[in-house]
Image (cartoon, rainbow, N blue to C red):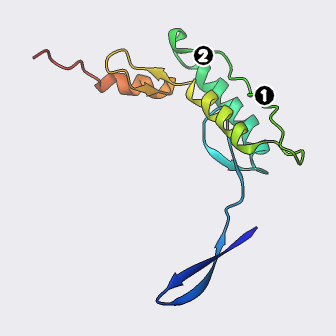
C-alpha cells in the first residue's frame, strides 16, 4: 500500500510517496519482530531453542513453557487486530525476564547468570 503526501515547500506543492513497511509480528517467546510469513517458521525453532536453554539452567531459574497468547480481537473486515496480537506477544516475551537480586534489572535467565558475575551491590554511603 502506498500513501501519497503533498508537501508545501517554497510556495509549491511537492508530491512524495511514502512506502509502508510490510506488517510484522512479534514472537511471543523471544520478543523479536518477524514478517507475517516467516513467523510460522520461526516460532517452532524458537520454542525448541527455548527448551534446550531452559534445561541447561539451574533449577531455580527454570521457567514454565511460554504459552502462545490467544487474541480473539477481530476487526470489522474479519482480520485479526495485529496491534493487539503484537501487544499480547510482547507482554508474553517480557514475562520471561528474571530480575537480578542485586540491582533489579531484568534479563533472560541465561543472560542473568552472566550478569551476576559482575553485578556488585552499591556501597553504603
Specify whether 38 is left or right of 32. Answer: right
- Identify which residue is drawn at 49% across, 26% down: 110
Specify whether 61 is left or right of 38. Answer: left
Q: Residues within 10 Å of mark 1 (few under 14, many from 20)?
A: few
Taking 19 as reference, is 64 above or below it? above
Which is nearer the eye, 77 or 120? 77
Could you tell me if residue 28 is visible in this image?
A: no
Taking 79 as reference, is 109 above or below it? above
Disc ID at residue 63: 2
Distance from disc 1 to disc 2, alpha carbons, whole Å, reads 20 Å
User: In this view, which residue lies farthest toward the top?
Assistant: 60
- Residue 11: x percent and y percent? 50, 90
- Residue 30: x percent and y percent? 61, 35
Q: Earlier in the sequence, mark 1 or mark 2?
A: 2
The residue that mark 1 highlights is 70
The secondary structure type at the circle numbered 2 is loop
The secondary structure type at the circle numbered 1 is loop
- Identify which residue is drawn at 75% across, 49% down: 38
- Residue 55: x percent and y percent? 61, 18
Which is nearer the eye, 105 or 117? 105
Location of the N terminus (image quadrant):
bottom right
Which is nearer the eye, 99 or 88? 88
Taking 112 as reference, is 36 above or below it? below
Q: Residues within 10 Å of mark 2 (few under 14, many from 20)?
A: some
- Identify which residue is drawn at 68% across, 23% down: 66
Which is nearer the eye, 18 or 34? 18
Taking 36 as reference, is 92 above or below it? above
- Corner quadrant of residue 15: bottom right
Specify whether 21 is left or right of 7. Answer: right
Amino acid at each position: 500500500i502506498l500513501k501519497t503526501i503533498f508537501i508545501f515547500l517554497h510556495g509549491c506543492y511537492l508530491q512524495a510517496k511514502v512506502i509502508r513497511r510490510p506488517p510484522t509480528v512479534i514472537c511471543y517467546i523471544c520478543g523479536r519482530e518477524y514478517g507475517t510469513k516467516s513467523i510460522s517458521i520461526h516460532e517452532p525453532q524458537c520454542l525448541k531453542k527455548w527448551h534446550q536453554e531452559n534445561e541447561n539452567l539451574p533449577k531455580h531459574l527454570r521457567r514454565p513453557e511460554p504459552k502462545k497468547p490467544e487474541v480473539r480481537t477481530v476487526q470489522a473486515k474479519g482480520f485479526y487486530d495485529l496491534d493487539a496480537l503484537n501487544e499480547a506477544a510482547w507482554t508474553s516475551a517480557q514475562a520471561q525476564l528474571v530480575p537480578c537480586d542485586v540491582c533489579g534489572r531484568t534479563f533472560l535467565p541465561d543472560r542473568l547468570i552472566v550478569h551476576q558475575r559482575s553485578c556488585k551491590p552499591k556501597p553504603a554511603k
